[in-house]
Image (cartoon, rainbow, N blue to C red):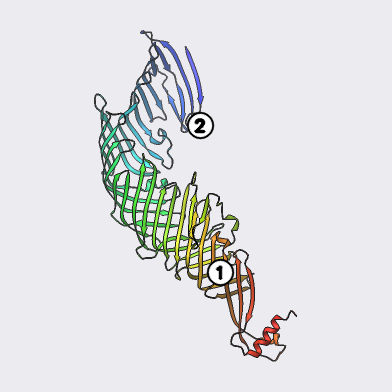
Amino acid sequence: MFFRTEFKGGSDLNDSYNLNFYHTFNKDNKSVIGLKTSDINFKGNKWVLNKDGDNKNKVVINRTLDSIDIREIVMNNSAQEQIRLKGQLADSTYKDLQLEFKIVSLNKITPAIDSLRLQGEVNGTLNILQKDNIYLPSSNLAVEDFSINDMRLGDLTVGIVGNKDLTEFAVNSQITDKGIEKLSVVGNINNKEEMPKADLLVSLDKFDLEPFAPLGENILSNIRGFVSGNARIQGPVDNPDFSGVLTLDKAGLGVPYLNVDYNFAANSRVNLSKQTFDFDQIKVTDVTKNTKATLDGTISHSFFRNWLLDLNVDTKDNGFLILNTAFEEEVLYYGTGYLDGKGRIFGPTKALNIKVEGKTAKGTSLKIPLSDVASIGDYSFINFVEKNKLNHVEEERVLDGFQGLELTFDLDVTPDAEVEIVTDTKTGSSLKGSGVGILLIRINTRGAFEMYGDFVVVEGQYNYKFGGVINKTFQVKPGGTIVWNREPLKATLDLEAVYALNANPAPLLDNPGYTRRIPTEVVIKLTDDLESPDIEFNIDFPGTNSIVQSELEYRLQDPR
């Protein structure tokens, strides 16, 4: 009896199965299902089953349908790539399957993993044994040119052998590159209890971290370096304890949202304890300006999920680069920031927080463009409650579903720092100054940007440009203020700016013969809302005799 079946779908919508088989009975009156030439499409690759069309590819089923004997099924992807399957199944509690691989591309048989592309050429055997509800593999596999994300790590061997009653498995696996053992895992897995337990020794020798860089998921970038050391893994295989010491060499990472990149000092130590990786006073240097800080703290996990960071950064009274971004269209802020203080990086990796406390150091220049008012973003997921008259705030947040990076800067602004409000990004008109004050800034990758605090000008300039013709610089008087209360572009101004020149007042005095130039100041007073301030103009004549000054003031007040 001959059958044919087709099926599309599976783990990928492009997967499809086109099977041709026949049914007969053997001499023991057991059902025999034989597979004729068929094909399977998996992950975009076509596998041909029983391409020779022989009678060896078959499955034998007993009368009670509780025992299946797979004599042999052969699949070919090309002239060389081949997978052979054989084994036995008994009801739902027992499986003993053997897979034999011959020159098979690793990426064709492994499931898709976010941010990780596995590559290599697989040869050897893999046994999958199910006893009750426990799956116990054993293998003798070799993966030549084993690579992650297109980066070759070496040749991988995976050796797992069980004892007679399958209560214990010996593990012996290595990654070797050019005769050097980069990774070794040796030990045992005990299977006497419901959850198997591991007792493994892991050795690393300049193992490359760069292939794992995509795991940063746009929060961290350029993860790099080499790790060496020894670690012991003990306990339940789903959440074991780690112990040991690892060292990092030529290591570092970047934070793309801040456009900063940091190198770690050579031989930086990472201590392992249970589910925690403890970074031991690691010296950090930014690659652009060569400023330095110290990193200390932990990265921990639970069941290899829910990774949490709790890291502290101390600048040790040095200006450390924490921001280095340039102007782009629709950007909320940009500039360069140096910190003299402490920072903390904490939270789950998919919703990371960076909190900075300290004072601004020399070279800091924060710029806020006014041209993108509509891009400030949605604040609906953050509420702030005033705590006292000092403008400290207590935060109530709902972070359900939030993913990204959130930053909080609690800064003591010093005269070393410059704050610039770019009033027109096309002409370059701007209001900038150095001063003192306390600013609280909250930013995240979903577009929220909030500022609180007072900035008192020590010195500053108002650069006014218009139409490519007017280009005047007004000096901002000391003592003027900019006050923020949440929205950066809704700040309240109370500033005076002066443009000084020597002018001939003859037109005002009705005296064409008056040729003397006198000191003249054009004073602009800016108050109220930053986006649309009230502007008052006055003209002063410092140093001019009282008679001429009175006449000029009268003339300026005359509506004619």
Is residue 129 shown above or below 3? below
Amino acid on which the number 1 mark rests in the picture: Leu
Provide the secondary structure element on which disc 1 rests. strand
Residue 429 seen: no
Where residue 215 sits in the image (x, y, percent)? 41, 45
Picture residue at 44% right of the left edge, 19% below the top: 36
Front: mark 1 or 2 = 1
Image check: 558 left or right of 168?
Answer: right
Q: Would you call the spot at circle 2 few (<14 residues within 10 Å), some (14-19), or many (20 or more)?
A: few
- First-in-chain label (1 vs 2): 2
Q: Nearer the viewer, residue 321 or 288?
A: 321
Image check: 450 left or right of 148?
Answer: right
Q: Nearer the viewer, residue 460 or 81?
A: 460
Q: Nearer the viewer, residue 33 or 249?
A: 249
Tell me, yes or no, whether the two marked residues, 1 and 2, touch with CB atoms within 8 Å. Answer: no
Residue situated furthest right in the rendering: 560
Image check: 527 left or right of 183?
Answer: right
Provide the secondary structure element on which disc 2 rests. loop
Residue situated furthest front in the rendering: 388
**Residue 207, label in figure:** none
Where residue 376 sits in the image (x, y, percent)? 56, 55
Where residue 342 sits in the image (x, y, percent)? 38, 60
Amino acid on which the number 2 mark rests in the picture: Asn
Is residue 103 shown above or below 317? above
Is residue 139 shown above or below 536? above
Q: Quadrant of residue 339?
A: bottom left
Residue 354 seen: yes
Q: CA distance from mark 1 to mark 2?
A: 58 Å
From the image, tell me which residue sits under label 2.
14
**Residue 431, label in figure:** 1
